[in-house]
């Protein structure tokens, strides 16, 4: 069964960290990389930056950035993911605010403006149509301060669409929670424009293995397509950084003056 985007992340919230070899280390590493990118663009002290993570999940980026001093508001479509992010932030001893919000109606659900907005971990390709992508990008631009910065990371679909992998992200890991195996099976749609991802997490309990399966859809979003959509939404100075983060990341600016 293919879940809706919300149901996918609601169901996966409790076990999402298991797809990382070391989730807490990933939180720290991603925050370091994002902080470097943001500082290079804004040149401001993080304490002076109000940052919106509008696809926060369980807090993979939001927690690390809050630890580095940013004033973080973290939102997601999934109430269960947001609740997990709150728990993890408290456990990490960092201060941030949270809310449940849909990127397509973001301006009605968060109080801007923000100097920075981010949507990482391949979140935008969940927007399967041009109209939904346009809605989300327009709403993100609307909550940014004049000249505000937007960063989004996606998989390298320019290469992936050529390769069309079927089996990916396989890992065998040992940790405090025991041995686990994670992998994905991708079922490509007939038109090649997207795929259904089947995320499997197998965990060992003595002689037995427990299998968890989650499935949802992604659009195989080319960089040129996203660049054009950002420009149509009013973003300026759009550029791609293919090496500064764990995925290709696009950077854009809200106009210095409102339309």
Image: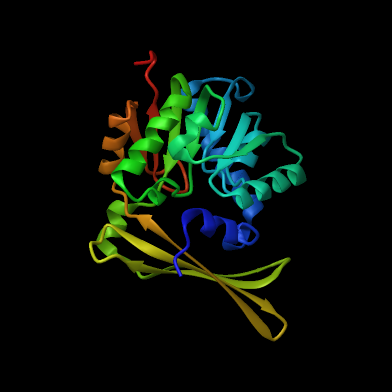
**Residue 215 on image: x %, y %:** 47, 65
Instruction: Give the answer, above or below, for where 239 lies relative to 115.
Output: below
Q: Is residue 20 visible?
A: no
**Residue 185, located in which quarter of the rendered image?**
bottom left
Instruction: Please name the residue shown 35% across and 69% down the image.
Output: 187
Pick out the residue farthest to the bottom. Answer: 207
Quadrant position of the C terminus in the picture: top left
Using residue 218 as the reference point, say whether residue 16 is left or right of it. Answer: right
- Taking the spot 31% from the left edge, 49% from the top edge, the residue there is 221
x, y percent for residue 207: 69, 86
Q: Residue furthest top?
A: 257
Q: Does residue 233 show up? A: yes
Q: Residue at x 72, y 34 (%)?
A: 95
Residue 206, given in percent of the width and then of the height, sits at 72, 82
Q: How is the image coloured?
A: rainbow
Number of dots carrying numbers: 0
Q: Residue furthest left?
A: 191
From the viewer's perspective, is residue 211 above or below residue 40? below
18 is higher (above) or lower (below) than 120: below
């Amino acid at each position: 069964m293919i879940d809706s985007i919300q149901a996918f992340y609601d169901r996966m919230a409790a076990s999402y960290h298991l797809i990382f070899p070391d989730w807490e280390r990933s939180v720290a590493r991603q925050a370091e990389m994002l902080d470097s990118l943001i500082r290079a663009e804004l040149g401001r002290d993080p304490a002076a930056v109000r940052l919106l993570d509008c696809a926060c999940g369980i807090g993979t980026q939001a927690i690390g950035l809050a630890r580095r001093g940013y004033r973080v508001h973290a939102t997601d479509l999934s109430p269960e993911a947001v609740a997990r992010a709150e728990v993890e932030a408290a456990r990490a001893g960092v201060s941030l605010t949270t809310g449940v919000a849909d990127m397509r109606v973001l301006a009605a659900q968060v109080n801007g403006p923000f100097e920075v907005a981010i949507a990482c971990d391949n979140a935008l390709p969940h927007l399967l149509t041009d109209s939904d992508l346009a809605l989300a990008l327009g709403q993100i631009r609307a909550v940014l301060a004049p000249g505000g910065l937007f960063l989004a990371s996606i998989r390298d679909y320019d290469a992936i669409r050529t390769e069309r992998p079927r089996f990916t992200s396989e890992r065998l890991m040992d940790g405090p929670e025991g041995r686990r195996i994670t992998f994905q099976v991708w079922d490509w749609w007939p038109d090649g424009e997207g795929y259904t991802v089947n995320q499997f997490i197998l965990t060992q309990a003595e002689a037995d293995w427990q299998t968890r399966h989650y499935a949802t859809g992604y659009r195989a979003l080319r960089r040129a397509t996203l660049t054009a959509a950002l420009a149509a939404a009013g973003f300026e100075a759009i550029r791609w950084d293919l090496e500064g983060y764990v995925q290709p990341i696009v950077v854009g600016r809200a106009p210095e003056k409102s339309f």
